Image (cartoon, coloured by chain):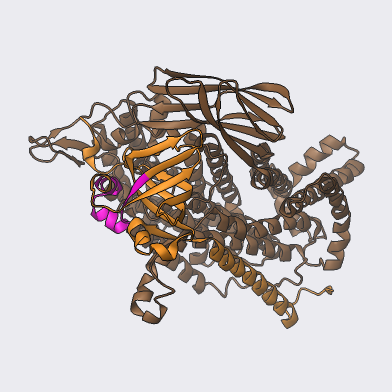
Amino acid sequence: MVTNLGFGTLIITFLVSIYGAIAAYFGARRNSPAWVDTARNAMLLTFPLLTITALSVIYLLVTGHFEVQYVTEVSSKSMPIYLRVTSLWGGQAGSLIFWSWLMSAFATAVTLRKWDRDREFLPWVILVSLVTLAFFLILSIFVENPFVSFWQTPMGNITTAMFQPAGMTPFVPQDGNGLNPLLRHPGMIFHPPMLYLGFVSFVIPYAFAIAALVTGRTDDRWIRITRRWTLVAWLFLSLGLVLGGRWAYDVLGWGGYWAWDPVETSSLMPWLTGTAFLHSVMIQEKRGMLKQWNMVLIILTYDLVIFGTFLTRSGVLSSVHAFAQSAIGPLFFGFIGLTFVVSLSLLSRRWNDLKSDVEITSWFSREGLFLLNNLLFLGIFIISFWGVIFPVLTEALGIVGQRIPALAGVFTGQKVTVGPEYYERATAPLFAGLLLLMGIAPLSAWKYSTSKTLGGAAWKPFVVSLLVVAPLLLGGMRSWPALLGFWLCAFVTFVTVYEFCRAAWARHNAQSENLLVAFWRIAGKNRRRYGGYIIHLGVVLMALGIIGIEVFQTETQGAISQGGTVSLGHYIVQFDSLSVFDTDDGRNVARAVVSVYKDGKYVGELYPRRDYYYESQQPMTLAGVRSTMEDDLYVILADWQPLSTTSATFKVYHNPLVNWLWLGSFVFILGTLVAAWPAKEPEIVVAQRSVPVMSKAF
Amino acid sequence: MEQVVEARPSMGGRAKFIIGGLLIMAAIVYLIISSTNANAQYFFTIDELKSRSQSIVGQSVRISGAVIGDSIQYDPQTLSLSFTIANVPADNKEIEAQGGLAAVLHAAVTDPARTHMQAIYVGPKPDLLRDEAQAIMTGHMGEDGVFYADELLLKCPTKYEEAVPSQVAP
C-alpha cells in the first residue's frame, strides 16, 4: 500500500516537474504571466509531493517492511528508530529520494521569495530547478526505485519488482541486513545530509546564472540575489566535509582524517570551485570585473555537484566507500555533458555582453590578489580532478596504444593510480600560497596597491610573525614545511587580528564606545568582510592541526602482556586488562583498559575497543583517544588472544595539535554564519555601495 | 618595481597578467606532472602481475584480488599478516557482466583454477579482512613471488547495497 503511495507520488512529481518546466519555458518565451504562474505552482507542488514520497520510505523503514528490497538492504530489526529514519540516506535508492526532496525544498523556498524586481528571472530559475529535479526523479523511477519489493515464484525463486508479477506471492525476509556499523556514528549520520544540502543549494545560484544568461540581464543582480544562497551552500558543504573527516578519525582507526579517496575528493571539488566563486563575485560586485569568469565557475560548480553525487553513487572508481555497480553511470554522464554544453553555449552567446570595461592594473591590488586566489583554488581543483580521473583515463587511453603501435609503449591501457602522496605533494605549495594570500590580501587596496604600498603595510606583521618562528627554530624544529606553515599561520593571524583591532580602535575613538562594543558593531556593520576574517582565522587554526598531524604524527605498535607497556614520545601506555563480552544489541565487545602516563605521570585511562556485529559479521574498531589541545594519543586495540585475554596488541598514534583542526572548523562555521546573516538594514548597504571606493574602505 | 597605473586597459598591463597567469599555470602543470610521475602506480590483476613477474619485481604497484578466508594467518607478536588472494578481473564492465562484485569474488575464491598469490602485510589486522573480501593493495612483489603490501584496503560488497536478491536468507 505505502509502496504504491510513495511510487505514485514519485511519478506524479515527475510529471508535474516536466509540466512545470515546459510551462516555464512557454511563459518566458511568450511573455505570459499566466504560464509562469502555473509553472510556479508546479514548482510549489513538488515539495509536498516529494515529502509524501520521502515519508513513505521512512514509514517503511521504521515499521520494518522487509518485503521492500531497500528496507532489507539498509535496516534491521535491532536498529533503533533514529537509525532507521536516517537509513533514508543509508543506501543508493534512498539517497536519491533524499536528494530530490532537498532539491524541491530549496527550489520552493527560492520560488517563494519576493520577485518584484526580478520577474524575468523567475521562469528560468524554475526551469533549471525543475529540469535538475526531473533528472533525479528519472533515476529514482527507472533505475533506483526504493519501493521495489521481493516476490517469490511457486518454485521458491526470489525476484524483485515494483508490482506483483503474475503467479508470484510476496516474499518477506525475516530480517534486514542492517546499516553498516561503520556508518552508525553521529558524524556519518549527519555527513551525507550536510553534503547533500551543500550540493543542492549550489543549484540555486546556478539557476540564477542561467536565468541571467538567457534573459541577457547580465549585470551583477543575479549575484546579489544568490549571495546568501551561495554562502549557505558553502556552509553546508564545509560542514559535510568536516563531519566526514571527523567520522574517519573516530571510526576508521587509521589515525587520520582525510585519505584523498576519490569519493572524498569528488566532494571537495565543488567546494574548491565554490570557494573560488565566493571570492571572485566580490570583485564583480566591487569593480564589475570577471563576469565571464564567474559564470564559468558557477557552471563548473554545478556540474561538479552532479559529478560528486554520481561518484558516490556509481562503481566507476575504487574507493573505501562501499557502493554498488549500477546503470546510473551513463545517465549521469549524459546529464553532466548536456548541461555543461548547453550552459557554455549560452555563455558564449553572451560573452561580449559580459565584457568588462575595467581592467586590473596591478597584481598587488586587491582584485589582483583575488584573481591569484582564484587561480590557486582552480589549480587545486585541477590537481584533484586529474588524480580522480587518472586511473580511468590511463585505462581508456589503451585504445590509442592499440590503434597506433608507435604509442603502444605510452598508452598501454594498464590502469595507473595515484595515491595520497600525489595530492599532498602537488597541492601543498598551492595551499601554502593561499595562506600567504590570506595574510596579504586584507592589507591591499582596491585598484591602486603596488608592491611598495603593500610592502609598507605588510612589513610590521611580517617581522612580528618571524618572532614567533624564532623560538620554534631555537627549540630544535628543523622541518622546513612545518616552519613555513607555522610562520604563515602566525602571519595571517597577526594581519587579521590587526585589521580587526585597527577598525575597532578607530570606532572606539570616533564614537567613544567601549572597545568590545566597537568590535561587535564593526563586525555587524560589514558582516561579509569580518565574517570572512573570522573564516580566515578558522582556516589558520585548522592549518595548525593539519600541519601538526601531517608533519609530526608518530606511531608505534606492540604486543604486550598484562602489566606490560609500550612507549611513544613522552607517553607510556600500560595494558591493564581486557574483557570480552556480549551486549543486548547483538555485539561482541572486546574492551581493553590501558593506563596512560605522560612524562612518568599518570594522566588517565583509555578504553580502546573492538565491537563485532554478529548480525552483519562486521567488526568495528573504536580507538581510545586522549585528546588535548596539545596533542591526541590515539590507541587502537589491534588484536588479542581470544582465550587468555592476558596479552594484546596495540597500535598507538601520537597526533600533535590535531584538535585545532576541529576547533578551527567551529570558528570557520561561526564566521560563515556571521557572513551569511541577513543584514538589518539592506537599504544602507545599497547606499554604501554608491560611495566611491576608498583605499581600505572595504 | 610596479608603477601606479590608472585603470585603463593597456598592452603593458595586459601582458603582465597574461605572463603571470601563464607562469602560475605552468607551475601547476609542473606540480601535476612531477607528482604523477613520482606517485603513479600500475594497477594490476594477479594474472597481469604474474605474467610480467621478473620485470616488475621491487617496483611499487597496486593489485586487487579476492581474499581466501582459510589462508588468513596473523601473528599478533610481530603483527605480521599473511593471506592468499585469487585473481579477479579489474574491469568494471567485466565484473558487472559476471553478476556483480560479490558474485565475482565468490567465484574467484571457490575456483581452484584461478591464479593465487600470497600477500604479506605488517600492521593491525583490518576489520574487513575476511573470506571473499576484495583486497586492494599497494606494495611490491618480492623475488620469492610473494606480494609485500605497504597499504591494504578492503572492500566487502556482499552485505550492503547488494543488488543480487539471492543474498537474502529467508
Tell me which chain appears brown: A
Residue found 74% across the figure and 57% down from its top: A436
Q: Quadrant of residue A657?
A: top right
Q: Quadrant of residue A45?
A: top left
Residue found 91% across the figure and 44% down from its top: A510
Residue found 63% across the figure and 67% down from its top: A290
* Left or right of residue A634, residue A22 in this image: left
| Relative height, residue A448 to residue A186 (above, below) | below
Foreground of the two, B167 or A477 = A477
Q: Quarter of the image containing the C terminus of chain B?
A: top left
Colour in which the image shows chain B: orange
What's the magenta region?
B84-107
* Left or right of residue A492, residue A604 in this image: left
In the rendered image, residue B78, in percent from the top left (x then y), is placed at 51, 37
Foreground of the two, A308 or A588 = A588
> Is residue B91 covered in magenta?
yes
In the rendered image, residue B59, in percent from the top left (x then y), is placed at 48, 61
In the rendered image, residue A446, in percent from the top left (x then y), is placed at 77, 63
| Relative height, residue B94 to residue A586 (above, below) | below
